[in-house]
Amino acid sequence: MWVSVLPTVGRANIVNGFLSSPEYRTSAVQRFYQTLLHRLAVPGASEVHGWVGSSLDLLSIELIFATTNEYYQNG
């Protein structure tokens, strides 16, 4: 499917589609919990869902994680 629409929408729009997809954002936010906050358990869906559905880009979300007390205590 993606190959057939590539000439029409261009590479940048296809990449943006992947990066802004709920699946990718969920994976990225889960990694932030694990790598930045050093949580061993996968975060609950309620913790992740708010971030995934927000209008913030992933860099902004990562920055917020990196400025929390939990980050400074566990990071």
Image: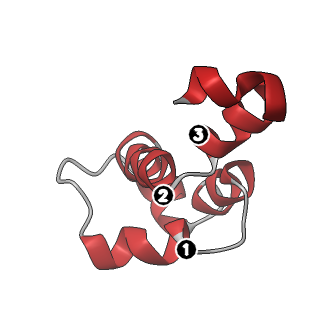
Secondary structure found at label 3: helix
Tell me the number on the disc at residue 53. Answer: 1
The residue carrying pointer 2 sits among few (fewer than 14), some (14 to 19) or many (20 or more) residues within 10 Å by Cα, namely: some
In the rendered image, residue 21, in percent from the top left (x then y), is placed at 54, 52
Tell me the number on the disc at residue 22. Answer: 2
The residue carrying pointer 1 sits among few (fewer than 14), some (14 to 19) or many (20 or more) residues within 10 Å by Cα, namely: few
User: What amino acid type is highlighted by mark number 2?
Assistant: Pro
70 lies above or below 71: below
Secondary structure found at label 2: helix
- Label whose residue precedes the other's in the sequence (1 or 3): 3
Q: Residue 8 is drawn in which quadrant?
A: top right
User: What amino acid type is highlighted by mark number 1?
Assistant: Gly
In the rendered image, residue 69, in percent from the top left (x then y), is placed at 53, 68
User: What amino acid type is highlighted by mark number 3?
Assistant: Phe
Measure the alpha-carbon separation of dots 2 and 1: 8 Å
Residue at mark 3: 18
Task: Say whether residue 10 is left or right of residue 2.
Answer: right
Task: Say whether residue 44 is left or right of residue 62.
Answer: left
Tell me the number on the disc at residue 35. Answer: none
Measure the alpha-carbon separation of dots 1 and 3: 15 Å
5 lies above or below 27: above
In the rendered image, residue 13, in percent from the top left (x then y), is placed at 78, 37
